[in-house]
Image: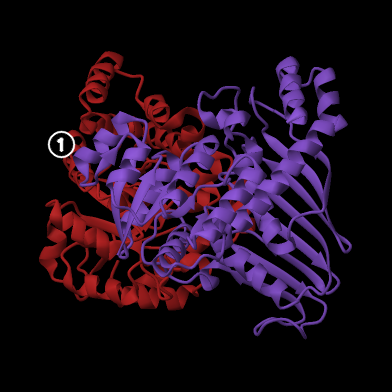
Chain colours: A purple, B red
Amino acid sequence: MIRVGMVGLGKMGLSHHALFNAHPGVSVAGVCDSSRYVLSVLGRYTEVETYSDYEEMLEEARLDAVVIATPSRAHTSMVAAALERGLHVFCEKPLTLDPGESEGLAETAAERALATQVGYHNRFVATFREVKKLLGAGALGELHQVTGEAYGPVILKSQGRTWRSQRTEGGGCLYDYAAHVINLINWYCGTPEAIGGTALPSLFSRDTDDAALSTLYFGNGLTGQLNVNWSDESYRKMTTRITLRGSNGRIYADRQEIQVYLRDAGGAPDGYGQGWNVRYTTELTPPVWFYLRGEEYSEQVDSFVKRASNGATEGVNDFASAAQTDRTIAMMVADAARSPSTEHAHEDGETATPKRRRRLLARRSSA
Amino acid sequence: MSQIADSPAEKIEEGVPMDRLLFGDNQFFGINHMSEEKARTQALRFQDIEAVIEVLDAAYDEGIRTFMCTTHERIGLVCDHVRANQERYPDFLFFPGMPYAHKYANAVTEQGMLGAVKGFLPDEGLFDAAMRGGKSLATRDIEGMVTLLIDAEMKMFQGLRTPVVFLQNVVVDLLLGLGFNDAFAIFDRHVRERYGAEPGFITMNMPALLDTLDEVGVENPIVCSNINKIGFRMCGGVEAYEEALRERRFRAIAMSVFASGAVSPEEAIEWVCTQPNIESIVFGASSRRNIAGTRALVERHWPL
């Protein structure tokens, strides 16, 4: 039984709290949030210890591990404080807003032999895991092209008062939505060598982006494209799609199905033949111990609990792999600052507040 | 009301009677757990509410009179239609399931947790709502706020018959995980007192939920969960489900019996109908032919 502390009880934090609390190998020894209202409700209706001060929880709750689901800007210092005390850390994505900091945290955790994990739940989605398995077997031959897409109806009008509407706090489509797709691409293809043609337009948001478009160059003849938009009402909820093309065929995957076309099935795993192969989540997904909003959320919690219990430092979504995603995001931000498309849009008056946007870009490029 | 196979008759005499076949609404909102392509095709087909009503009419004419639906805003249009045509639907029953969770999840991203809750509080009876809501926020008594949110979700069903009101699985399973057990009793009380209805609970963790409902004293609860031959989203495992069906005192509704199409209709229905103590099956279909087909399959095993 490991003692876990939860920090940040927003949308993701509450869901993590429920899953960790339901896990038979976990005792949730404390929850911490800045909202006294949320704490008082939890304290009153459940039996959990509540803290409004993070350091105090670290000091008093005798923890083995922490789960950090605070606004992204706060991750670095909170993760560092936990690692310093020898705690295993599960952190929500993105790990930090600065790849240098993410890489530093990964090194610290490795030196101290601590288990780390970042909440990129797509790597626990059965269909996306199947893609990894197929690529590992070399089923597509030489990889030529990867396309990553995500669409959803999050920001549909011009408003927003939370950290999620501020790019400087880690809000926006790039950090919130596109990060998931980039992370999958990193899993399949690694970190790109170069990035071009990035646009991070604001559609409804004032202080952050609502879409992310980019071209990724991996070397060895592999090119990728990213197309993400969280202001698309035609989607009921977030939809993530990956398409990979190689010398031996094509893979398409979303959360629910994987469609594989193979020119030659020689190198493919059992059950795959030449031509079209379709597998559904209903057959690929193993049962979980507790279900809240998707098997992948349960599985990622279980993975972390096992890793923390066994002191396994490397594994799916460890800090080192999440730092790759932060590195890719930083490359995109730098590329967007150079990109003509964003500037032109502003000069044509296509966005609501061009001046503010330019300042943001100037800050970004000088950073 | 027909007798249930393998089940003592007194079981169904407790609480509000339920038909053996209930009509679900996933197909109307582009929800398919197996394929996004199928989901989109359905969303396109049902974007006009007339198309939804046409299918509901077909179900009604096949004798399936209970519509188990979410509180998606488009259901409001169905409610308006049924209210305006009462003579066409003398026996039409709604089993609402609340809340339609994605609207909350997206609102939380946009407005924060409390902002989202405030945003969904009713504007009708403003004074009353503000007093109850204000008090609940100030005194940190969540009960007032929960009941206000229930009332907001129930508004579209005004004047219609809603003998069972469900709490959706996203909320049930979140509360279950958090150990927020009193919330189930709050929901139970409010639904009974305010709406004269019986509360129902949708869950993906049926055996665990039954334990918790026992603890908070919700007796013989209506619990709707996935029950299908391949164990799809039956947390705790098929055996634990089978044991609960055999031995626990609750009114079971089986959903996802076809596991989103992973099991053939004949096989799926045969398996589910031979499980003990299942009182009802909720299913979705997009055409009269499929509705009649499912009805006929069920009729082989259960008298309807």
In this picture, residue A340 sits left or right of residue B166: right
Question: How many tags in the picture?
Answer: 1
Q: Is residue A230 visible?
A: no
Q: Nearer the viewer, residue A63 or B142?
A: A63
Vertical relation: B273 (above or below) B112:
below
Q: Position of residue A145 (x, y in %)?
A: 82, 60
10 Å neighbourhood of mark 1: few (<14), some, or many (≥20)? few
Q: Residue at coordinates 74% horizontally, 37% vertically from top-left?
A: A333
Could you say which is closer to the camera, residue A102 or residue A291? A102
Residue at the spot 29% in from the left edge and 62% down from the top edge: B206
Residue at x 55%, y 60% (from the top left corner): A110
Residue behind mark 1: B193
Residue at the (51%, 65%) spot, across then down: A313
**Quadrant in which the N terminus of chain B is drawn:** bottom left
In this view, the residue in front, B119 or A78, is: A78
**Label 1 residue SS:** helix
Q: Is residue B30 above or below residue A251?
A: above
Q: Quadrant of residue A203?
A: top right
Q: In the rendered view, tell whether residue B55 sits above or below residue A342.
A: below
The residue under label 1 is which amino acid type? Glu
* Residue A350 position within the rendered picture, expressed as x and y whole percent measured from the top left: 78, 21
